[in-house]
Amino acid sequence: MVKNRIVEITGTKYPFILGPMRLITLGEMAAAVSNSGGFGQIAASGLSSDRLLLEVKKARALTDQPFGINIPLYRKNAFDALEIAIDAGIKTITTSAGNPAKFMKRIKEADLKVLHKVSSKEMALKTQSCGVDAVIATGFEAGGHVGRQGTTTMCIVPQLADALNIPVVAAGGIADARGVVAAFALGAEGVELGTRFVATDECPTPDFFKQLIVEAGSDSTILLGKDAMPIRVLRNRVVDMIQNPDKHQEDKHLRGADADAQYIQSGGDADTAIMPAGQISGVIKQIESIGKIFPELMKGAILLTQQLKTMFGGE
Ligand SMILES: Cc1cc2nc3c(=O)[nH]c(=O)nc-3n(C[C@H](O)[C@H](O)[C@H](O)COP(=O)(O)O)c2cc1C
């Protein structure tokens, strides 16, 4: 059992968090991660309040371990999601995509712990002054939405660890024990993994998405929407079409697809779906069972730390 400020906040065995993924990390996946010793969470993104409640009940039936909800704060039903968490007896939530300030009164009143996602030092300092318990620093290499600033995990984590009094969780570019040890060396007290969990047996996403991740190389992802809401996704034909519309004038299968290019969980195939994934895809070589990922990360991190100690001249 690790003892640090993040496990105090999450109430879990490991300071390892399942990254919320829209319409992917639902009740079953959150419970499976929590049963393995990590902090599972249900992404509220894309769910109605009724559906969110259903997923919370599902998770509750599948685990007696702590799990959370990720609430994107810009959503109209963000307050509803917060009340659902409170009613369900959830102790820790994460928030993203918005300013936590106006939610803090209710969060504190309900004695909830909250970790908020940030991508810059300025945002992190503001967030800390709102009274959140920890920040999740998302680097530019992460899958899904990333900050416009373009700062990588390697650079944002030590800056936040130096600047903040509250603990920092590193998100983006971590899929194995090397990434975990690196993040902790940079000053993180926890890690959040997203892409690694897409390539799992139990992940409710089409098999071709999982397969594309295990086949990915070092440059298989690209950033879409650089100046508005940047999102890191796997390269495929529809992404190429969005970037180079002239090249695809004759492409019947894809014509018009950029107008309604679909998020992977809403439909489409390997050519037409938008599949968020991080640069770390290139390191992921196998589809694993969810329950093995965090315990193996911990084992690997202990071994690697011992090897590093020897390498640096320790006992
Ligand atoms: C398919 C996918 C969907 C995601 N959806 C969300 C989301 O709905 N909300 C959110 O806060 N982050 C989302 N993320 C980001 C993850 O929660 C996590 O922070 C990120 O994946 C960590 O970086 P990594 O992919 O390098 O592990 C998503 C990531 C992926 C890969």
Image (tube, grey):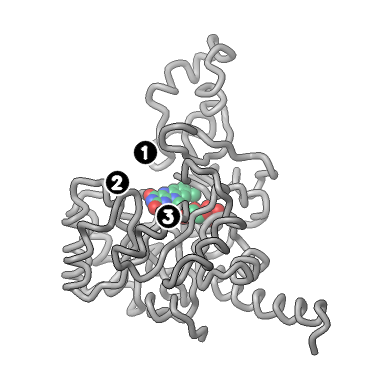
Q: Nearer the viewer, mark 2 or mark 1?
A: 2
Q: CA distance from mark 3 to mark 1?
A: 27 Å
What residue appears at the point 22 percent right and 66 percent down from the top-left corner? 85
State yes or no: Cβ of the residue under disc 1 lies below 8 Å from any atom of ligand 1: no
Going from N to C along the chain, the mark reached first, 2 or 1, is 2
Crowd rating for badge 3 (residues with CA inside 10 Å; few <14, some 14–19, many 20+): many
Q: Position of residue 265 (x, y in %)?
A: 39, 42
**SS class of the residue under badge 3?**
strand
Q: Nearer the viewer, mark 3 or mark 1?
A: 3
Q: Position of residue 188 (x, y in %)?
A: 54, 69
**SS class of the residue under badge 2?**
loop
> Of residues 190 and 265, which is closer to you in this image?
190
Q: Quadrant of the C terminus?
A: bottom right
Read off the residue under disc 2: 46
What residue appears at the point 17 percent right and 56 percent down from the top-left corner? 79
> Of residues 41 and 5, which is closer to you in this image?
5
Read off the residue under disc 1: 266
Q: Residue furthest top?
A: 250
State yes or no: Cβ of the residue under disc 2 lies below 8 Å from any atom of ligand 1: yes
Q: Nearer the viewer, mark 3 or mark 2?
A: 3
* Amino acid marked by disc 1: Ser
Q: Which mark is residue 118?
A: 3
Q: Position of residue 42 (x, y in %)?
A: 34, 60
